[in-house]
Amino acid sequence: MRSTSFNGVFRLAIDANGLEYDKWKTGEGVPVETCVCNLSYFFNGAFDLHWHKGLEFTVVLQGQMEYQVNDKHYRMEKGDCVFVNSGAMHSGRYVDDGGCRYLVISFLTSAIDGDPDGAFAKKFFEGVMDAKSLPSMLFENGSNDMSSLCISIHEIMKKKEDGWEIEVKGILCQLWHLFYKEAKRLSGLSVEKPLSVSPIKKAIQYMNDNYASKLNLEEIASMCNLSKSEFCRCFKRITRQTAFEYLMGLRIKKSIQLLEEEGLSVTEAAQNTGFSNSSYYTKIFRRYMGCTPREYLRRRKG
């Protein structure tokens, strides 16, 4: 989970498609990244709905968080660990103003086995790596050693002493073994047919590309090849907000970047983020941020 910062507020490094930029450094023997984050550092205590190519385990270290993967929502507490598959949409927000510290372990399967066509990969990755059938899995505190293994990987990568690659690879194998056994155990159980998130990804991409333009539900639903009612139902089920609420929140976040990073006036920020006038922009800004744009800027500078 790579993030960038503006004036102390973090945001994920994601493109207009909602895809997080590749985070693994070329030349390193093990494509693994770890980081400890706090939701209180993010805009409104939440990181954006996004997805990426790699696999991810997240462990709550302190506090609580609402963690979403596609249309599934988890209430996570200290010691809980959640797996997110490649391509699965996910986001998180804190439960209260106390924030939430959490550890993220991101990696590619080549960190365990570099041959994607080999017998090992076919046995232990194929099937499990299908985000449509297995987008996520929660491991509650005390149910196994998933959380402690993730923490061990992080501690090793902080020091990066001689031979750290071998240590990390060994622990990743243990981690995947535990996950693989649980995934196989659940594979025989009847589960609810997962909702396709492809249309919602398209909608999010479209809104990210066109947030400054006039948009309507019919236009977005048509682009997703869904009826207006079906689109609204799917979008609300996955994001827990309406498409209009998502768009307004997106516009407000974009406007804050313009106000803080580019020094635009309130009127200019409103015009550049799709608001019809500065009065309406101020009304929506207050709804999302609890203050006017000018009050927000004064607080940030003060």
Image (cartoon, rainbow, N blue to C red):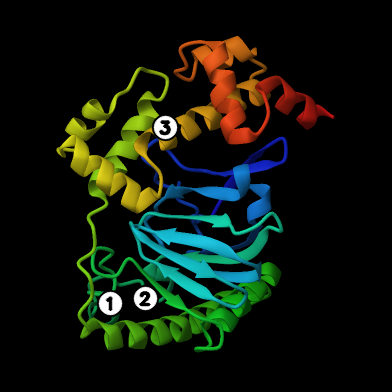
Q: Which mark is residue 121?
A: 1
Q: Is residue 245 above or below residue 91?
A: above
Camera-side residue of 205 and 288: 288
**For the residues marked 2 and 1, what is the alpha-carbon distance in whole angstroms?**
7 Å
x and y, in percent, of residue 54 in the image: 40, 61
Q: Residues within 10 Å of mark 3 (few under 14, many from 20)?
A: many
Describe the element under mark 3 as helix, strand or loop: helix
| Badge 2 element | loop
Q: Which callout, 1 or 3, points at the residue further toward the start of the chain?
A: 1
Which residue does the image show at 47% across and 42% down from the upper left?
14
Residue 57 visible in this rendered orientation of the protein: no
Q: Position of residue 168 (x, y in %)?
A: 54, 77
Q: Position of residue 91 (x, y in %)?
A: 47, 54
* Distance from the alpha carbon under mark 2 to that under mark 3: 41 Å
Please, what secondary structure does the residue beneath circle 1 have? helix
Task: Name above or below for residue 46 compared with residue 113.
Answer: above
The kind of residue tagged 1 is Ala
- Mark toward the viewer: 1 or 3: 3
Which label sits on residue 247? 3
Q: Is residue 157 above or below residue 269?
A: below
